[in-house]
Image: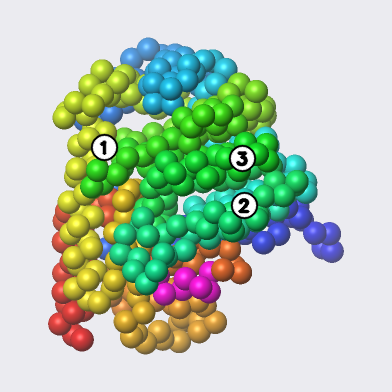
Amino acid sequence: MSRQMHARRLDGVDKNIWVELTQLAADYKVVNLGQGFPDFAPPKFLQDAFCKAVSGDCLMHQYTRAFGHPSLVTILAQLFGQLVGHEINPLDDVLVTVGAYQALFCAFQALVDEGDEVIIIEPFFDCYQPMVKMAGGTHVYVPLRPRGDSNLSSGDWVLSAEELASKFTAKTKAIVINTPNNPIGKVYKTEELQVIADLCIKHDVVCISDEVYEWLTYDGTKHVKIASLPGMWERTVTIGSAGKTFSATGLKVGWAIGPSHIIKHLKTVHQNSIYHCPTAAQVAVAESFQTEYERFGSPESYFKLLPALLHHKRNKLAACLESVGLQPTLPEGGYFMIADISSISFDSDDTISQDEPLDYRFVKWLIKKKGLAAIPVSAFYSPEHGKEVQNYVRFCFAKEDSTLTAAEEIFKKWGSEK
Ligand code: IK2
């Protein structure tokens, strides 16, 4: 058969780090600090809400409103309207999606045309790049760089305002930001967001703000929504995830929130591809948000309990990494930590290609020889810039204490062998 089967838009986007490393981790039955999902149970109120939804009204098992179940868009508009400081219309300004993934996909498909440029800040959640490419756009990268010699906190990774400004051209259609960031854990400060906002306004550019870890910040760090800055509501699509919010990544309920003149285009993509998300999952998420709304800011709020739990896990993992000479960068938010592997010597065997970047080889060695899964940080960079960060790997600390203790045992054994 001489005819090419696949569409050209798939060229160069066929590899996926999660598919590859999740399989490798499963093959070796490792302690998994790789993929970003909690291995502890979601809160009981979410589980109860889900059980109630599936066992109640038979309409819970049927189609629902295309752009989001009324109960979910209503509570999202109510809660986020207060956080953004702008009235949000539940029917026009909110789109419920299959996880944050689909919200991102709808945003790129809806807003990016052939020839448009999209600015992506490195490191970035890996799907931004293939999604921009599939939409026909061109990615333009700008890196966060460690400030000075020390990069012990994610706050030490910063953008150069001049470098960022130099990336905006007449072709720039959108910029994607991610705060708290995956994989570094950087939480952008208001001043940093203001630099981005000023450029968006000056060049009439849309900001796609991926805020899936919005509730997870540590040591008093505050998450600021770029949509809340003056002049930004009109040009920002804010993306969130119930999976990350309620420690239930299998739910795959996400959302995009923004002004109706932008969201209506995302709805067009959504109605012509997915149509709507599972009804019962949306209703369970709506009820859970309602619960949280009523106790917002109180000590019982899951939005306070979860970061407190993860703060302890973050510190435990940092101590483990340090004990074997892996230098961690302490995250201000999110549930990942990167660590410098420069001081570790390891022998990657014949099964690991020497052509691969150092961090990929290290991660494969870690999985096969030490029984521990992590993710190479160069996977969060463009191929052009990945080489510059191949001495970092990412660990997820949103794990049961028993999982972290199992990892600690591996690190201790490793330490004693050195
Ligand atoms: N945006 C970011 C920044 C994410 O981290 C994710 C989920 N990624 O987790 C996998 C990992 O990094 O190990 C998403 C979007 C997608 O969220 P959802 O699960 O709601 O589709």
Q: What residue did someone put label 2 on?
A: 165
- Marks 1 & 3, CB-CB < 8 Å contact: no
Specify start and end residues of the magenta stretch as a single range.
386-392
Residue 215 makes an appearance in the image: yes
> Where does residue 62 sit, x and y in percent of width and height?
49, 18
Residue sitting at x 61%, y 69%: 384
Which is in the foreground here, disc 2 or disc 1?
A: 2
Three-letter amino acid code at the position of disc 3: Cys
Three-letter amino acid code at the position of disc 2: Ala
Q: Secondary structure at mark 2?
A: helix
Classed neighbour count for the residue bearing mark 1: other residues with Cα under 10 Å, few (<14), some (14–19), many (≥20): some
Q: What residue did someone put label 1 on?
A: 42
Which label belongs to residue 354? none
Q: Is residue 327 left or right of residue 357?
A: left
- The vertical placement of 234 against 342, above or below, is above
The first of marks 3 and 2 along the sequence is: 2
